[in-house]
Image: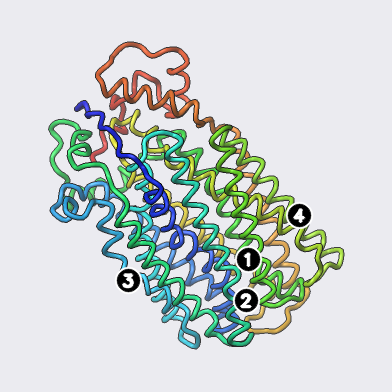
Amino acid sequence: MATAPISQPRPVRLINYLAYGSNDVLGAGSMAVISGWVMIFYTQFCGLEAWQAALIFMVARVLDAIASPVIGHISDNMGDTAIGRRFGRRRFFILAAIPLLPSFAIMWVAGQSFWYYLVTYVAFELVYAAVIIPYETLAAEMGKDYKTKAKFAGVRILFAQASAILAGFLPKWLIEWLGKDSPDTFLYMGILFSILFMLTATFLYLFSWERSPSEVAALRPKGDAKPTVGSAIRNLYRNLFSTFRIRAFRLHLGMYLGGYISQDVFNAAFTFFVVFALLGSISVASTLLGTMYIVQFIAVMIAINVALRNSPARAYQFAAVSFAIGVITLLLMWNAGVRSGDALLWVPIVFAGLGRGALNYIPWATYNYMADVDEIVTGRRREGAFAGVMTFVRKLTQAAAVAGVGAIMSWGGFVSGAKTQSPEAIHTIASVLGIGTIVVLFCGILVSLRFRLSSATHDVLMAEIDRLKAGDTSAPTPEARAIVEDLSGWKYEQLWGNNPVAGIRR
């Protein structure tokens, strides 16, 4: 294996942090709008049944889940092309997607057919993936040390929560302007967010960077030919799913999915719960969601400090418990007769928001170190592969979660377009909100008990990588050996390319 030169990192300035973070207005903002409002839009304003809305969501996410790993793999190898050398192997995708981002707005045109909504949703998901997959690699490209990467993740999630606040409150403001029964509420929201997406993607492109082509090329084993399109396709899924052989990444995925799928289930059911169980309105649901996102914003700032100073796994556990307390309290209050307008509702909203904010931040903070763990196993940098797998798994599970909510609601007697629902349908919505959310959270907590990546262990990992890059073949200290073997899941003698994972071509 070639010994890669240890390059001096470029200084990361405030504008670089802001540019990187701002793009999660697209990443999290669009998902906040979709998870909070697309089901209610399709069923209450477009005449679709709950199962049809869920099917659209599932088909779009499955197709996107197939495309996302392809984009990740291509971005890992695009530095060998003229386009990649001119615009960046990651950043080219971001630049090319900017004029396509208004595809988000056309999703929200009321009165169209099932096929219209399916095609427009799929189109946006593909554009979204073309931006987000390369974007998710840039923190690992631009920063090396633990604190820099944690700051990238923190700024990103702060922007994400700010966009989620807007996604929560914007429908309420538009309803007050357009009237409560106007479907144009969602169209105008789509237009406004599309403009924001284009601005932030441009900002990101202008103030971000990647590893130089020479540094990337130095990590390719001697004798490896430049990858062709054919070889990329042949090795695609073997390369991508080799990431599952990295122990820290497997555990990270479990925590990530536990935190995010629990929120998918909650978001898909929450608006229906407010409208039909709490006897509120879309405007009330908008207010509650917006307030929850404000609390999440505060929680992210707390979580940044906790994750920098303590174990991310411990912070994750506290966050999951807080979210669960909020969900349980909400259901107990509803069962006790609390309804829309009661001030007591703010109690579960605060608990849920505190937990959700930290759950949003922690997985993305730890994700930025996964390529480091992989590097000591393979001797290569495969940020794109990890980003592709993250999105692939996330989209498949999110599709299953939301489609499951829609299917269960239909099975429970939910009637699309109805002003009221039967007691059976309402209890089904409440059961999905409670049981579905808490079961997934519990699974995430179980996984977090085995996750040991922290600032201290990451420092040891990076010191070992630098030592191996410098050609030092002496034995590691017992402490370094134990830490690296725990994070990687491999014996020390098998690291730095001496394993089957490293033999998978890029």
For marks 4 and 2, the one nearer the N-term is 2
Measured from the top left, where is residue 311 in percent x and y?
Answer: 57, 33
How would you rate the neighbour count of disc 3 (Cα within 10 Å): few for under 14, some for 14-19, many for 20 or more?
A: some
Q: How much space separates mark 2 and mark 3, taking CA atoms?
A: 27 Å
The answer to the question of whether label 2 and label 3 lie on touching residues, with beta carbons closer than 8 A, is no
The tag on residue 328 is 4
Residue identifier under label 1: 290
- Could you tell me which secondary element the residue under label 3 belongs to? helix
Residue 23 percent across, percent down from the top left: 41, 58
Q: Secondary structure at mark 2?
A: helix
Q: Quadrant of the image for the N terminus?
A: top left
Q: Amino acid at mark 1?
A: Gly
How much space separates mark 4 and mark 1, taking CA atoms?
A: 20 Å
Residue type indicated by callout 4: Ile
The answer to whether the residues at label 2 and label 1 have Cβ atoms under 8 Å apart is yes
Q: Earlier in the sequence, mark 2 or mark 1?
A: 2
Which mark, residue 100?
Answer: 3
Q: Does 473 appear above or below 355? A: above
Q: Where is mark 2, residue-wise? A: 172
Amino acid type at mark 2:
Lys
* Foreground of the two, 64 or 151: 151
- Estimate the x, y position of residue 30 in percent, counting from the top left: 47, 65
On screen, residue 266 versus residue 459, left or right, reads right
> For numbered disc 1, what is the local secondary structure?
helix
